[in-house]
Structures are given as structure tokens and as C-alpha cells.
Amino acid sequence: MLKPVLKELKPTDELYHKLDKISANRAVSSAHIKNLIWSMKCYPELLTISPIIICKDPETGEWKIIDGQHRWDAAATSSLPVHVLIVDPMFRKMIGHLNSFGRNWTIKNFAKWYAVEYNNRNYQKFLELLESNLVTPGVLIAICQKSHVRDIGNGGNRDFKDGKLEINKYNITHIEDTLYKLRQIEYASCNPSLRKATIKKKEFSQAFLHMFAKERSWYDHNEFLRKLSSTDHFFGILSSKVDMINEILRIMGKK
């Protein structure tokens, strides 16, 4: 494995202009770059004590920024020299965990990383489902796991962040059926119509996932849809999962 090498790059160096970002990385924040430009002008030593981590792609020969894309954009905009730490390409696999020490990657950031950088079809499908349904990433993970609660106890969706998400013949029917039932609720609500912001609340989705788990005992989804279409509801002003569940029970006449 290549031993890390620390090196200073000046605007006159050839490598300075060859650095490129990894396509699966987070979108660059313009506001963050502006703050960094101001900080670098006040404290130039910041670029020395916090090097930009780069590696050479063994397949394309291109130089990629693993960590520090915001610092790089700020420095390049101001034509400032930078310090880079050249590491082995294998460190690209650790980018998500590396970024977790700084501005935390969101679940969607991890999904994009595996979908784009590793062409992982499970994460590509996850992003497609996320784009076409009004659910949060955490709720969608729970659905993929055939659970009604988000896996926060296991290190904060650790398996998902480690690239172990599976969407296959064993859970795809459950996933699609669950998302379809959540969409039905949106269409059935009339008094008033549910706002998209309400539907996307994790507490709203989690309340219904809890009810779906009881469907073979005392919850009847079709009955709920019929009653929702002709009954006033207060989902829009509720904020907790428990209150959402109690509202579902009230509409069904069970409370």
C-alpha cells in the first residue's frame, strides 16, 4: 500500500490544476466556500494544518480529491497554495466514514456514494424510490428492512452506511406495497387534503408503518381509507408519532 505523502502545491505546479472532485461526493456549498475564503485570508496556515487528501485513480490516472473539496475550491478561487496528502487509492472506500468526522454525511449522501461510485444497484433503486415517494431516507430504510422503526440503535443505520443495503425478491414486494399504501393515504384525504410537508414527516410515516404491522389483527387499511375520505382529520397540526397513531384510531372509530 502506498505510504501517505504530504506535499505543498502552488498555483504554478502542474498537479495543482489537475485535481478533480469525485462525482459521488456531496454537492458543494457556495456559502461554505465563501466562509472558507474569508478564513484562509485571515489565517493562511489553515491550509497547512488541514491538508486536502487526494489519490491517483489507478484506472484513469486522474487525480481525485477524497476529502477537502470545499477547502480546495476556496483555495483555488483565491489562487492560494495548498498542502495535499497523497494516499493510496484504497482510501476512496473510506470516504463516507472520513466525512462523518467532519460535516456529517446524510443517509442520502451515503446512498449516492454507493450508487455512483460503485454502481450498486441496491442503492440506485433506493434513490429512485426516495425520489418518487414522500418518505424520509430513514423511513425508507425501515421499510426495506421490513420494520416499522428506523434502525438507529445499530450505530445509526450502520449496515446501510457500510454498503449492505439489499433490495431483492425477498423484500421488493413489501417495499412497493408499503409505499403504495402511503400514497393512497395522500389521495384519500379530503378534509382537508394532506400537505406534502405533513406526509413527509417521519412521525407520520412511522405511525402508519406501525399500523400496517397490525393489519392482520385489528387495523384495516381499506376501512381507514374509506373513513378518511369522509372524516375531518388533524394530521397537519400533530407532531409526534403517538399523536398520529391516536388520530388514526379516532378516524377508525376505535378511540
Image (cartoon, rainbow, N blue to C red):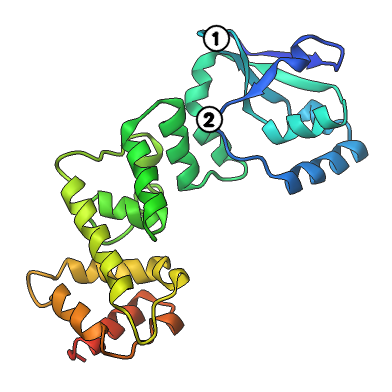
Residue at label 1? 60
Query: Disc 2 vs disc 1: which is toward the camera?
Result: 1
> In the rendered image, which quarter is residue 248 located in?
bottom left
Residue drawn at x 58%, y 7% is: 61
Q: Of callouts 2 and 1, which one flags the residue occurring earlier in the amino acid sequence?
A: 1
Looking at the image, residue 124 lies above or below residue 139: above
Quarter of the image that includes the C terminus: bottom left
Tell me whether the residue at label 2 lies in contact with that at label 1, contact meaning CB atoms closer than 8 angstroms.
no
Residue 204 at x, y percent in the picture: 36, 71
User: Helix, strand, or loop for circle 2?
Assistant: helix
The residue located at (14%, 70%) in the rendering is 214
- In the image, what residue type sits under mark 1? Thr
The secondary structure type at the circle numbered 1 is: loop
Q: Does residue 165 sit above or below 247 in this rendering?
A: above
Q: CA distance from mark 2 to mark 1?
A: 19 Å
Say which of 130 and 104 sits in front: 130
The amino acid pointed to by label 2 is Ile
Task: Using residue 49 as the reference point, say whether residue 219 is left or right of it.
Answer: left
Q: Is residue 208 visible?
A: yes
What's the residue at 30%, 61% (across, down)?
149
Q: Which residue in the structure is indicated by mark 2?
A: 95
Q: Is residue 217 left or right of residue 106?
A: left
Q: For this view, does 197 lie left or right of residue 157?
A: right
